[in-house]
Image: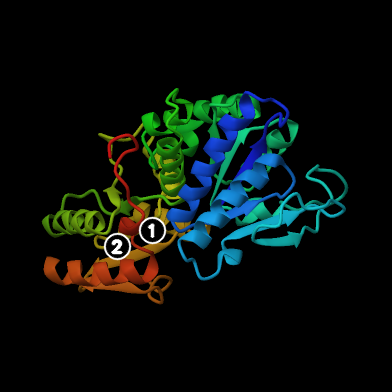
Amino acid sequence: MHILVAGGFESEDDVMKPRVGAFCEALGRAVSRHGHVLLNGCRTELDRMIAEAAYQDMQERGDPDPDRRVISYLLSGLQPLHDYGTIIRSRLTDWDIKGESFYVPEQVQQADAVILVGGFEGTFRAANWARIAKKPLLPFTAFGGAAEKIYAQELNDFGQKYAGLVEQLEYERLNSVKSDWDERAADIVTLAEKVAQSRSVLVIMSYAGLPDVEDAFDTFVQVCEELGYRCERVNEENAGDRILPDILERIKRAAFAIVDLTDLRPNVFYELGYADGLGTKVIITAKEGTELPFDVKDMPTICWSGQRQLRENLRKRIISVVKPATAVASPPIGQR
């Protein structure tokens, strides 16, 4: 996983500097020890602190190639503020949006999550680029600055951007007043892992209440839970005012969808087409004997006759199509 840390602080502030430095050391170690790649801008004192902490921790722990795990993209025309890891000249001279074309900055494009610390105008630019690139934002508020204001906006958008990935209380810990930097750094990296990879699975299937299909749903839930995912389906009881918009929104947020074509319901084919067009990973199942239409016959389908067979084949398909979430699953932040 790639994590971009961006931000800044008044380096001549003798009160703030040691606090930010201590936190950057803790955050750099946390990124290193969780096995992630640190992305960096190589232009602020905060960039230097976080890169130094991560790189030195990797060296001390015997990482075979820390230069592959601390990567900076430096704007053309600037001189690097540190020499830790790999430093690459960016094709950009600034992060402004102007002219007839523009590019998402490399470190934002490659990031799975963006952590913001303090900061000023440039941190607002980083946040806006992350929003354009649809990257999750984790603004750490302990040092005020731009991150504190960005946090307020992200919390306001929590339901749209992060619901289903983490509990709101977990996200609100970015605004905690605790000053144990090691604990808070570990919390933030764990939060980054959670928001970067959805563990929600949407099941799309007939609502007719057929016994075999209901048993199949129970099997979907069991297999997904074993692999670290939360399995859900939308019906009249748990939907909002309208079912279809709720389903389409959940398809967008899902790590993947399981689509059971048994009973050949029109709404199921509609939602399958939406998921496929959106690029959501889809696993298709159907009870043996189901006459699949010609336009889905070429899509890999798990044909099942019993639940044991379905369970075994579904598990194999999820592992081959989607990386199991168990490896990155963590207990709720603050409940270790």
Residue 111 vs residue 128, the one in the foreground:
111
Q: Is residue 21 left or right of residue 30?
A: right
The kind of secondary structure element at disc 1 is: helix
The residue shown at (71%, 29%) is: 10
Quarter residue 223 falls in? bottom left
Q: How many numbered discs, if any?
A: 2
Quadrant (top left, top right, bottom left, bottom right) of the C terminus: top left
Colouring convention used in this rendered image of the protein: rainbow
Q: Is residue 88 left or right of residue 246?
A: right
The residue shown at (62%, 23%) is: 15
Residue 161 visible here: yes
Dot label at residue 261: 2
**Amino acid tagged 2:** Leu
The residue shown at (29%, 62%) is: 261
Which residue is tagged 1?
269
Residue 143 vs residue 320, the one in the foreground:
143
Instruction: Please report whichever mark, 1 or 2, sits nearer to the chain's N-terminal start.
Output: 2
Quarter residue 178 falls in? top left
